[in-house]
Amino acid sequence: MTIKIGNAPCSWGIEFPSDPAYPTWQSVLDQCAGAGYKGIELGPIGYMPEDPMVLAPALAERDLEIIGGVVFRAFHDPAMWDDVMDASVRTCKALAAHGAQHLVLIDSISPRRAPTAGRAYEAEQMDKAEWNAFRDRIATIAKMGSEEYGLTVGIHAHAAGFMDFEPELDRLLNEVDESTLKICFDTGHHSYAGFDPVAFMDRYIDRISYMHFKDIDPVVKADVVAKRTDFYKACGQGIFCNLGQGDVDFPAVRQRLLDAGFEGWCTVEQDCDPAMPGTPLEDARANRDYLQSIGF
C-alpha cells in the first residue's frame, strides 16, 4: 500500500485567489517542498498560475506535483451558478493540464448557516425544492469533472455551508451515484460539525477517494461553537491545531486506511491566519514529523 502525504495553500492562510497579505505562490511552493512534502493542491483557482507553462517548471524545480484542486463556491445560491461554473471549469482545466486526479467540491460559507457551525440541531435546513436544486448543481459539476475531464470528484463537508453535517452528507451520497461523486473526507471539519470522523470512515471507507488531514483544538472548538464565532475568526483563534494535538484520533484514521488498502494522497490542511504566532513552515514541518511518527 502506498499513501502519499501532501499539503495545501490553505495551510499558509490562502483562502481566496489574492490578498496583499498572502505569501507569493513561489514562496508557498518553496516552503511546502522544504517541509518534506511531494505534492500540493492548487489552492483557490487564480492563486497559482493557470498557465501550465509557468507552473509546471516551478513544480518540477521543487520536486512537487499537483494533487488536486478545490471548488469552494456557493453551490447553495442559484444566483451564483455562473461563478460556480467558471471556477469549476478553470479548476478542471488546470488539474487536467498537470495530470492531477482530485477535484474537490465544497459549498462555501452561507450567512444562513454561519451562526450554527458545530450546532447541527439548530442549523437551518433547505426545503425539498431548494435541496433538489442544490444537489443537482453539485451533481452537474461532479459529472462534468468525472466524464469530461477524467477526474475523481469528491464532496467535502465544510463548516458553515449547507453541506456540513453528517445527515446532509448521507442524503447527498444516497442521491448522487457513486460513480460520479465520491468523498474527500476532512477529519477536522467532521469533528467541527460535532461528529466522529473514525465512525464515519467505518461507514464510508469504500467511497472515500481522498483525505484531508485536519485536527481540531477541542477547547477552541467548544468556545467558538458556544459563541457562534465566524469561521475565519475561528481559524484566527487557532481552531485548527497541529496534527496530533487535537481531538482527531489519527492512529485510528491510519488504521482504517490500512485496513481498507487505501492508496493515494492524503493532504494536510491547517487553515490559519498568517498573522498568528509561529509560521506555516514550522507547522508544516511539525505536521509532517507527526505523521511520520505514527507510520505515514
Image: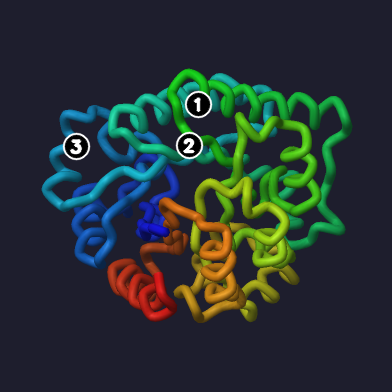
- Residue 140 location (% of width, % of height): 62, 22
- Nearer to the camera, 7 or 291: 291
Mark sitting on residue 56: 3
Query: How far apart are the two marked residues, 1 and 3, measured between alpha carbons?
Result: 21 Å
Mark sitting on residue 145: 1
- Residue 71 location (% of width, % of height): 50, 36
Please determine whether, in this image, residue 208 is positioned above or below residue 96. below
- Secondary structure at numbered mark 1: helix
N-terminal of the two: label 3 or label 2? 3
Q: Quadrant of residue 34?
A: bottom left
Q: Is residue 156 left or right of residue 146?
A: right
Residue at the spot x=37%, y=60% of the render? 5
- Label 2 amino acid? Leu
Which residue position is annotated with label 2? 103
Q: Quadrant of the C terminus?
A: bottom left
Callout 2 touching callout 1 (CB < 8 Å)? yes
Query: How far apart are the two marked residues, 3 and 2, measured between alpha carbons?
Result: 18 Å
Residue at the spot x=38%, y=53% of the render? 8
- Secondary structure at numbered mark 2: strand
User: Is residue 11 in view from this perspective?
Assistant: yes
Callout 1 touching callout 3 (CB < 8 Å)? no
Residue at the spot x=74%, y=53% of the render? 165
- Label 1 amino acid? Gly
- Residue 41 location (% of width, % of height): 37, 47
N-terminal of the two: label 1 or label 3? 3
